Image (spheres, grey):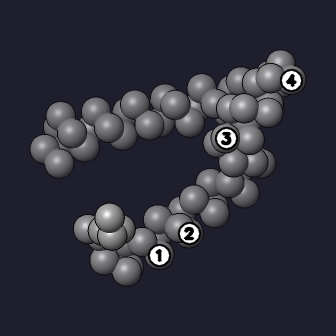
Amino acid sequence: PAVRIDAGYPQVVLAGLLVGVGTRYGAGCTSGHGVCGLSRFSPRSAVATASFMGAGFVSVYLLRHLAGF
């Protein structure tokens, strides 16, 4: 099936920039910390992964349950 993105170009560009900033700020990507870092028992990666997951949980709760998206 064809790929369908419901967001406009400005939103997609903003999302890409935010991912890049987060990767730079977090000293690695989410999968890098979650897969490689946790498998090496890195405390830094454990904190980073917990932060990513926590931020995701809070974002979903706020957007789905409080904002109604």
Looking at the image, residue 27 sits to the left or right of residue 9; the answer is right
Tag 4's secondary structure?
loop
Q: Amino acid at mark 4?
A: Arg
Residue at 32% x, 38% y is 60
Q: Nearer the viewer, residue 35 or 54?
A: 35
Report the Cα–Cα distance between label 4 and label 2. Answer: 29 Å
Report the Cα–Cα distance between label 1 and label 3. Answer: 21 Å
Report the Cα–Cα distance between label 2 and label 3. Answer: 17 Å
Which residue is tagged 4? Answer: 40
Q: Residues within 10 Å of mark 4 (few under 14, many from 20)?
A: few
Which residue is tagged 1? Answer: 13
Q: Nearer the viewer, mark 4 or mark 2?
A: 4
Q: Amino acid at mark 3?
A: Ser
Tag 3's secondary structure?
helix
Q: Residue furthest front?
A: 1
> Which callout, 1 or 3, points at the residue further toward the start of the chain?
1
Residue at 64% x, 30% y is 49
Q: Residue furthest left?
A: 68
Residue at 75% x, 48% y is 28
- Where residue 56 sits: x, y (%)? 44, 37
> Which callout, 4 or 2, points at the residue further toward the start of the chain?
2
Picture quadrant of residue 66 = top left
Residue at 33% x, 70% y is 2
> Which callout, 3 or 4, points at the residue further toward the start of the chain?
3
Report the Cα–Cα distance between label 3 and label 4. Answer: 13 Å
Which residue is tagged 3? Answer: 31
Vertical arrangement, residue 69 with respect to residue 34, above or below: below
Tag 2's secondary structure?
helix
Report if residue 58 is visible in the image: yes
Report the Cα–Cα distance between label 2 and label 1. Answer: 6 Å
Mark 1 touches mark 4? (CB < 8 Å): no
